[in-house]
């Protein structure tokens, strides 16, 4: 039985789908998956041994240039690639209009979430059958339940296995961790960024404790931030720009990860690396890092979580004394998550990495 998964973006959402693939392949060894995914993330589905073909789609690149993409034949080529196989089932695991359109472009019976349990209800117009999955469940569990109902099997909700084949990353499972930490400091929203001065102080604490600190980056602004974090600390290494596979190797070889709310934090969770994730304006409850060794450290400022890309807080507690220099903590919700607090919680996590919160 061949199944097409449509989960085109973003990185965290794609990673959230991997445990469902593991469940399904264990329940039915005859299942084979193909996966339609955004061009930037084509590496990720291929890490799972149950995924045979990865079909790249360029919706992000086409956006705003639909006519140009149409006349260049890119959309027609994608549709031809998608329709080379008649699928026994097509699962839209994303629940957006764009993923619904991709699902309908394929050949096969299309299923997805119901109107009351989907992110964009109009997407249900593209499905042959829908399933209701409660909003109260974590995103990983929602996808697992959708797959189990669509493919008619039961799974153990107490076992979460992302199913990543370490050999496909160029690694050997069970390799001893190096005494290094990865700081995932880059994120999409300005309000989700932990203050740079805090990162720099945390890097000093970590290196004094004997760790080497690795700083990845994805664009020029993140590279410049990494340079500022690494200032005057020879034990902090700014990595060259990495592919997702390359970054996964660094994370998998590390003792732990400290991250803001970012898709790469979910990658660390999928690799079962102890990860402390920092949440200010966002709430990890239904979409935070998930699995063994994950700890969510949340702001306790009364405005958090605001779920906003722009900070509008004007109350008390927005200034902080930092090594004698008065400066504005931005966003102010992170003023309650100082470096020494983060390091204390991270050490507790390393001492008991099985705990999840």
Image (cartoon, grey):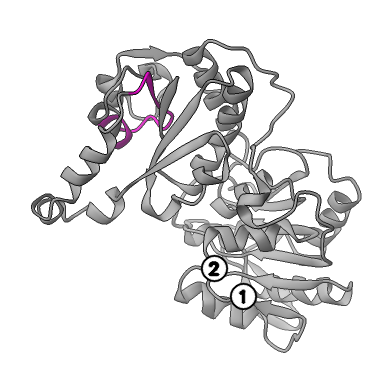
Q: Is residue 99 inside the magenta stretch?
A: yes
Of helix, strand and loop, which one carries label 2?
loop
Q: Position of residue 130 (x, y in %)?
A: 38, 14
Q: Residue 154, how many percent across, how many down?
A: 62, 12
**Residue at 74%, 23% in the rendered image:** 158
Identify which residue, 317 or 237, lies in the foreground. Answer: 237
Relative to 239, residue 93 above or below:
above
Do we see residue 252 in this rendering?
yes
User: In the image, is 104 to the left or to the right of 136?
Assistant: left
Where's residue 312, x and y in %? 47, 56
Mark 2 closeness class: few <14, some 14–19, many ≥20 residues within 10 Å: some
Q: Which residues, given as a range, are shown in magenta?
A: 87-101
Q: Is residue 145 above or below residue 268?
A: above
- Are the residues at dot 2 and dot 1 in contact (C-beta closer than 8 Å)? yes
- Taking the spot 57% from the left edge, 40% from the top edge, the residue there is 48
Identify the image quadrant of the C terminus.
top right
Res 262 seen here = no
Q: CA distance from mark 2 to mark 1?
A: 8 Å
The residue labelled by disc 2 is 242
Does the magenta-highlighted stretch encompass residue 14? no
Residue displayed at 43% across by 29% down: 93
How many labels sit on residues?
A: 2
**Along the line of sight, which residue is nearer the eye, 349 or 253?**
253
Q: Identify residue for label 1.
A: 239
Element type at marker 1?
Answer: loop
Q: Quadrant of the N terminus?
A: top left
Left or right relative to 22: residue 88: left
Asked which quadrant contains residue 195, the reply is: bottom right
Instruction: Please provide percent x and percent y for residue 200.
Output: 70, 76
Give the left or right position of residue 247, taking residue 291 as reference. left
Q: Residues within 10 Å of mark 1 (few under 14, many from 20)?
A: some
């Amino acid at each position: 039985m061949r199944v097409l998964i449509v989960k085109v973006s973003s990185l965290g959402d794609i990673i959230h789908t991997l445990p469902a693939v593991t469940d399904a392949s264990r329940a039915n060894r005859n299942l084979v998956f193909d996966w339609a995914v955004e061009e930037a993330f084509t590496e990720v589905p291929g890490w799972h041994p149950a995924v045979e073909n990865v079909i790249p789609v360029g919706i992000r690149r086409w956006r705003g240039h639909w006519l140009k993409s149409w006349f260049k034949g890119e959309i027609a080529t994608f549709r031809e690639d998608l329709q080379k196989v008649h699928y026994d089932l097509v699962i839209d695991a994303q629940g957006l209009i764009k993923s619904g359109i991709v699902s309908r472009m394929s050949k096969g019976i299309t299923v997805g979430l119901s109107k009351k349990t989907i992110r964009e209800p109009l997407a249900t117009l593209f499905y042959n059958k829908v399933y209701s999955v409660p909003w109260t469940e974590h995103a990983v569990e929602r996808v697992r339940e959708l797959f189990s109902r669509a493919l008619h099997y039961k799974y153990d909700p107490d076992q979460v296995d992302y199913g990543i084949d370490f050999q496909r990353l160029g690694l050997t499972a069970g390799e001893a961790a190096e005494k290094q930490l990865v700081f995932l400091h880059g994120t999409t929203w300005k309000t989700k960024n932990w203050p740079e001065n805090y990162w720099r102080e945390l890097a000093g604490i970590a290196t004094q404790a004997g760790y080497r600190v690795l700083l990845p980056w994805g664009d020029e602004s993140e590279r410049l931030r990494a340079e500022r974090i690494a200032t005057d600390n020879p034990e902090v290494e700014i990595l060259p720009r990495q592919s997702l596979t390359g970054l996964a190797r660094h994370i998998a070889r590390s003792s732990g990860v400290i991250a803001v709310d970012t898709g790469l934090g979910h990658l660390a969770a999928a690799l079962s690396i102890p990860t402390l994730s920092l949440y200010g304006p966002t709430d990890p409850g239904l979409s935070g890092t998930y699995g063994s060794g994950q700890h969510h450290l949340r702001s306790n400022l009364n405005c958090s979580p605001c779920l906003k890309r722009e900070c509008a807080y004007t109350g008390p507690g927005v200034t902080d004394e930092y090594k004698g220099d008065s400066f504005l903590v931005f966003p102010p919700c992170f003023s309650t998550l100082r470096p020494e607090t983060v390091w204390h919680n991270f050490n507790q996590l390393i001492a008991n990495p099985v705990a999840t919160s």
